[in-house]
Amino acid sequence: MHGFGVHTSMWTMNWDRAGAEKAIAASVKYGMDFIEIALLNAPAVDAAHTRALLEKHNLPAVCSLGLPERAWASVRPDAAIEHLEVAIDKTAEMGALALSGVIFGGIGERTGVPPTEKEYDNIAHVLTVAAKHAKKRGIELGIEAVNRYENHLINTGAQAVWMVEKVGADNIFVHLDTYHMNIEEKGAANGILAARDHLKYIHLSESDRGTPGTGNCPWDEIYATLAAIGFTGGLAMESFINMPPEVSYGLSVWRPVAKDEAEVMGNGLPFLRNKARQYGLI
């Protein structure tokens, strides 16, 4: 998980053979260092096919997911463990390096009240079991802090650190996202500094999830702080162009956030790469 990557939602959210071929070819064309694959339906993924494509192009991969309602860790820990173990196995079979994202809950999971100790205990138990399974498969796990409108459980870098340390496994890390940080943190720098000891992965996403450089994310503050802490993890551009209805619902995206792939990859990608070079991150 090093260098500059892209979330494959740029081209597809359906990781079938056609989606894999399209997204991997495009990622290679744009010279990405790695890709992030959304595992919305892990059991259906042709892992051997994906692995062959990744190895052919010498392209590392990270997988990500949010738990479906039937497997929300806070209330259905056994189902969550089962779901994560399948996803971990598929991640390993594809030859990917890590499984990250909202592995502790659902995108759109909210109870309407603050989190309870029981919910957090269930999540910690699930992640402890999942981390042990992942360790056997050579996989790292990432906890992504997301905004309050998508999940009520882990919203800030400090909360993600707290859960990582509560679990205590050496193969679990913090995953930040500039879109969520722009909502939740008291300054992007503070979120990065809070997570610095466990931060290995960050989504670079604009304030409206559209084309980076066209919104109000404080990019110089973000990059300068990453440079200051000596960040060497994955920098993954995330902008949603192709989303199925269930994902759009969970993310509350009701209108196009960017014109098309050409706009995001032609303008947003160079913007983010140039900033990364400016601050010595790539």
Image (cartoon, helix red, strand yellow):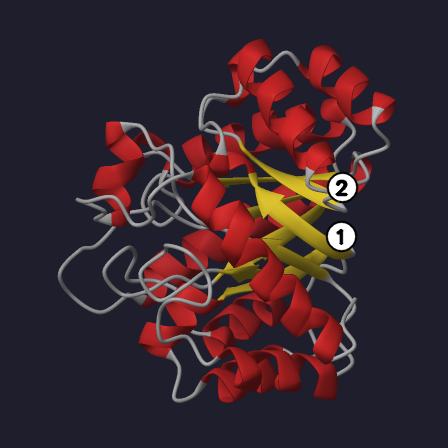
* Residue 101 seen in the figure: no
Task: Give the residue type at disc 1.
Answer: Met
Q: Which of the labelled discs sits on residue 129, or is there none?
A: none
Vertical relation: 232 (above or below) 195 = above
SS at mark 1 in the image: loop
- Residue sticking out furthest to the left: 112
Residue 207, position in %: x, y? Answer: 35, 67
Mark 2: few, some, or many residues within 10 Å (few <14, many ≥20)? some
In front of the other: label 2 or label 1? 1
Q: Nearer the viewer, residue 112 or 7?
A: 7
Q: Are marks 2 and 1 in contact (CB under 8 Å)?
A: yes
Residue 129 appears left or right of 189 = right
Instruction: Answer with mark 2 or mark 1, whichever residue precedes in sequence.
Output: 1
- Residue sitting at 74 percent across and 12 percent down? 48
Query: What is the quadrant of residue 18 in the picture?
Result: top right
Task: Give the residue type at disc 2.
Answer: Leu
Residue 33, position in %: x, y? Answer: 77, 47
Vertical relation: 206 (above or below) 135 = below
- Residue sitting at 17 percent across and 55 percent down? 111
Q: Which of the labelled discs sits on residue 97, or is there none?
A: 2
| The C terminus - image quarter | bottom right
Q: Which of the labelled discs sits on residue 1, or is there none?
A: 1
Residue 273, position in %: x, y? Answer: 66, 63
- Residue sitting at 62 percent across and 79 percent down? 223
- Residue sitting at 16 percent across and 66 percent down? 113
Residue 134 appears left or right of 219 = right
Vertical relation: 266 (above or below) 197 = above
